[in-house]
Image: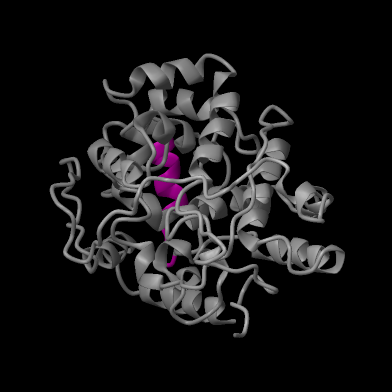
């Protein structure tokens, strides 16, 4: 209910002001300057609100087949059964959910916690989906083996299973498990240093991924998840506004179509597919789109750079990306893993356990 109220407020605000200026005002409040039309947005120094980057990822005892050794050998099958009931849109949301969880406080399910000031209510997370699938899997697991499987592991398993389905079984990888759930979640940590903004340039992306222990190859590979799912018009308004002069790096036909779709006074809830060519498949089409200018975000277009173009070409021309994506998701899954001393196994994914 709280989320619906927030979305309603957003819609009313955007109906009275420019979507572009309103979107940037959110980021400006956290130290980001507004993009100047015709000039690439650059990252010079961390905003004052940024904190010290987290340490590099550590294993903290993660292991493939962890639950076979912890009296819940059917854990992954139970999660998979829940995921298989999801629609394509929710499946895409489960992959995004894992990314947004791991990039804020590590892979500890802090994004699932309910509350007026939790990550779930942070501006970049208002459009997250898939919470119901995670809850359904958790409920089933609590009946099968109560107090054993963490919500953080469920998020990782669900992202893997969603990737498998959306890629038509081409992406399949094993997930090391044994994470514990975090007890802290703040909305303001979804901005600043953690989740890359859609208007980030290449230098910013490299820095923000490096802060999480991920290298430029991981960055390019994980960006391929933008081959599935949808995006709201305000997220890419810097690429198509003003309508008479869309970004020169965007395909002109796509820019025209986006302007027609998004040119409404209240477009906060208007969505378009992130991949207009193969919108229902998690595949390497994204990299072809990067090279042809058929991507939505500045952060996507940034990969069409001399620094990353060879990787983009490599993944655009083969199925190598499927294996690379699985490996990058596993690596991302090690970010900020909590131990039993730092976390817990929540009984309900939306609330921490009572002391």
**Is 281 inside the magenta-drawn segment?**
no
Report the magenta residues as a range. Answer: 254-266
Q: Judge left or right: residue 50 versus residue 256.
A: left
Residue 129: give x, y in percent of width and height. 60, 60
Q: Is residue 261 magenta?
A: yes
| Quarter placement of the N terminus | bottom right
Q: Is residue 183 above or below residue 204?
A: below
Front position in the image: 31 or 274: 31
Image position of 208 (left or right of 120)? left
Residue pictured at 46% horizontal, 46% vertical: 58
- Asked if 181 appears above or below 202 in the picture, the reply is below
Asked which quadrant contains residue 11, the reply is bottom left
Give the side of residue 99 with respect to residue 204, left or right.
right
In the image, what residue occupies the spot 29% across and 38% down?
Answer: 206
- x, y percent for residue 198: 35, 49
**Within the image, what quadrant is residue 351 found in?**
bottom right
Asked which colour scheme the image uses, the reply is one colour
Q: Residue 115: image x %, image y %?
A: 51, 81
Residue plotted at (15% across, 41% down):
39
Quadrant including the C terminus: bottom right
The answer to whether residue 1 is seen in the rendering is yes
Residue 291, relative to residue 262: is it above or below? above
- Say whether residue 355 is left or right of residue 274: right
């Amino acid at each position: 209910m709280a989320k619906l109220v927030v979305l309603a407020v957003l819609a009313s605000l955007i109906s009275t002001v420019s979507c572009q200026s309103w979107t940037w005002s959110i980021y400006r409040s956290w130290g980001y300057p507004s993009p100047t039309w015709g000039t690439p947005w650059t990252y010079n120094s961390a905003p004052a609100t940024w904190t010290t980057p987290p340490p590099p990822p550590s294993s903290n005892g993660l292991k493939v087949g962890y639950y076979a050794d912890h009296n819940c050998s059917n854990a992954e099958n139970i999660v998979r059964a829940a995921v298989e009931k999801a629609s394509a849109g929710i499946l895409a949301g489960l992959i995004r959910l894992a990314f947004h969880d791991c990039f804020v406080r590590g892979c500890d399910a802090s994004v699932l916690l309910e509350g007026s000031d939790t990550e779930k209510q942070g501006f970049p997370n208002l459009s997250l989906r898939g919470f119901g699938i995670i809850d359904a899997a958790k409920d089933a697991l609590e009946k099968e083996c109560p107090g054993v499987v963490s919500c953080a592991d469920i998020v990782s398993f669900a992202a893997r299973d969603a990737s498998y389905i959306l890629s038509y079984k081409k992406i399949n990888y094993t997930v090391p498990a044994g994470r514990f759930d975090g007890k802290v979640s703040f909305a303001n940590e979804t901005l600043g240093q953690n989740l890359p903004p859609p208007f980030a340039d290449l230098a910013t992306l490299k820095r923000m991924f490096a802060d999480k222990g991920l290298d430029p190859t991981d960055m390019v590979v994980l960006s391929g998840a933008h081959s599935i799912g949808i995006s709201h018009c305000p997220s890419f308004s810097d690429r198509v506004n003003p309508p008479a002069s869309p970004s020169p790096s965007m395909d002109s036909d796509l820019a025209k179509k986006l302007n027609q779709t998004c040119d409404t006074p209240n477009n906060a809830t208007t969505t378009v597919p992130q991949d207009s060519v193969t919108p229902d498949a998690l595949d390497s089409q994204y990299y072809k789109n990067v090279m042809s200018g058929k991507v939505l975000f500045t952060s996507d277009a940034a990969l069409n750079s001399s620094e990353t173009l060879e990787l983009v070409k490599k993944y655009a021309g083969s199925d190598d990306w499927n294996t690379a994506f699985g490996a990058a998701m596993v690596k991302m899954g090690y970010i900020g893993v909590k131990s039993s001393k730092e976390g817990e196994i929540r009984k309900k994914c939306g609330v921490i356990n009572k002391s």
